[in-house]
Amino acid sequence: MSLRSVNTARACGVGIALLSLFSGGAHAADLMTKAPPVPYTETDDFWTRPYLFGDLGRTQLKERGISLALTLGDEAVGNLSGGNRNTATQAGQLFFQAKFDMAKLAGIQGGTVGLTLVDRFGRNLNDEAGIPALQLTNEVFGRGSILRLTELYYSQKLFDDRLELKGGRLPVGSDFFFGLCEFINLTFCGGQPGNIQGGYIYNWPVSQWAGVVHYNFAKEWQLSVGVYDANPNYLTTSDSATYFLPGVPGSSPASGVLVPVEVVWAPSGPLNGTWRFGGWYDSASTIDGGLPGIIAISPGTGGVSDQNLGDSRGRYGVYESILQRLTVEGPKAQGWYTFLNTTVADHRTSYQDYQIAFGLRHTGTFASRPEDEVGFAVGTTHVNTRQGVRRHSRVAWRRPPRVARRGGRPDGRQRRRQVDSRQDHCRQLPAKSRRDPL
């Protein structure tokens, strides 16, 4: 088994986010690791106000039950060595969010209507530089440079908010999996099951028609169950009737349902955290249309007939995600934090069958910069050892395309494991260039 370090293709990146140009909305943040933004007041000037363009009446709208957000994020990355060539690229996304409090607007206590539109742009450094990486170097790239309908849902909370019923167009990662995204490499960002099973588990900005139930069955404990329409046509970048409105995909022989189940323990107090344990089952065909190297027919030899892999249905996996504050070193977010993510996918049907990521982060390392963060993370992504077309195999794989000339294997075979490491210094910029969520 060979081991590949990310140092083979060294990449440096800078992410710039102009969050909440009109307002703010957090995306899947499990644990606050930054100090909350300063509330808007009429006396705030350009250098201290939390919104780039000022209030613009948003405070009055929120009091009436309407919250609006427009967020721009951009990641610039460069390849210094390895791959086919040294180059730099950038990728980003602009997304609009709106939430409507139905208690204020229509007298429906606990009701919320949510809408999110996402427009991505830019280029993938792995492609531009010929880096043979299993995970994206700039995580924000992907799923087409188009305007997608990412969320359109109705949520209803009942029984003193212990039960939440939610339905509509939803990304799986908005209600399940690990949600923190502090590092620019995809290994350490977003829903890990979707990172290695992106052919049928669709992370942001792709969404599916779904129904989700969250039940707080005890203090600090929550059980969540979801049912998602599993259809590869959601990945389209050419049919606006699917990726935008009305958002209904055409039928597919690979269709089925994806059912994630998750238990969350969220200890409160100074050392707060989020501990997630879950799994999923997908009833769709093992031909998922988006998995690298997959083929539909396993050729038969020696009198054995060809095998149609589309006749095999059902795939599954388990995961854990721990995000925990370790120390309290100040009145706000100063202190040490850690995370550990592990996902193991069905070995029978998976090209990448497990991923592990671990990281540490410290806020307030420098006394003069109490909100700055310094972090380190290391992770590994494993390629299924059942690679190669085999007789009698329920899954067969084509050899992936030839890897890069520099940093790759001379025989053109894909490496079976990739190890990534990242060091990060997040300098919290002045309010005019950093817009934190409300």
Image: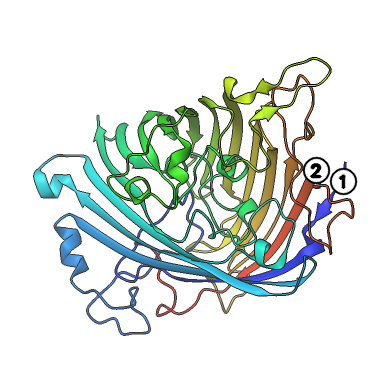
Q: Does residue 408 lie above or below 174 as drawn? A: below
Amino acid on which disc 1 is placed: Ser
Numbered tag placed on residue 416 in the rendering: 2
For residue 255, above or below residue 198: above
Q: Nearer the viewer, residue 272 or 95?
A: 95
The residue depicted at 29 percent of the width and 78 percent of the height is: 53
| Residue pictured at 70% horizontal, 50% vertical | 134
Count of numbered tags: 2
From the top left corner, tell me how far across and down residue 266 is, in percent. 48, 39
Residue at the spot of label 1: 2
Residue 276 left/right relative to 159:
right
Q: Position of residue 382 (x, y in %)?
A: 74, 41
Instruction: Give the Cα separation between the discs numbered 2 and 1.
Output: 6 Å
- Residue 55 coordinates in the image, percent (x, y): 24, 74
- As helix, strand or loop, the secondary structure at mark 1 comes to loop
Q: Is residue 402 above or below residue 58?
A: above
**In-front residue for pair 192/246:** 246
For residue 59, side relative to residue 289 (left or right): left
Q: Mark 2 touching mark 1, by CB under 8 A? A: yes
Point out the image quarter for the N terminus: top right
- Kindly identify the amino acid type of the residue bearing the numbered disc 2: Arg
Side of 337 where 83 appears, left or right: right
The tag earlier along the polypeptide, 2 or 1, is 1
Residue 397 circle label:
none
Around disc 2, counting alpha carbons within 10 Å, would you say few (fewer than 14), some (14 to 19), or many (20 or more)?
A: some
Image spot of residue 210 (x, y percent): 36, 34
Q: Assign the C terminus to one quadrant of the image.
A: bottom left
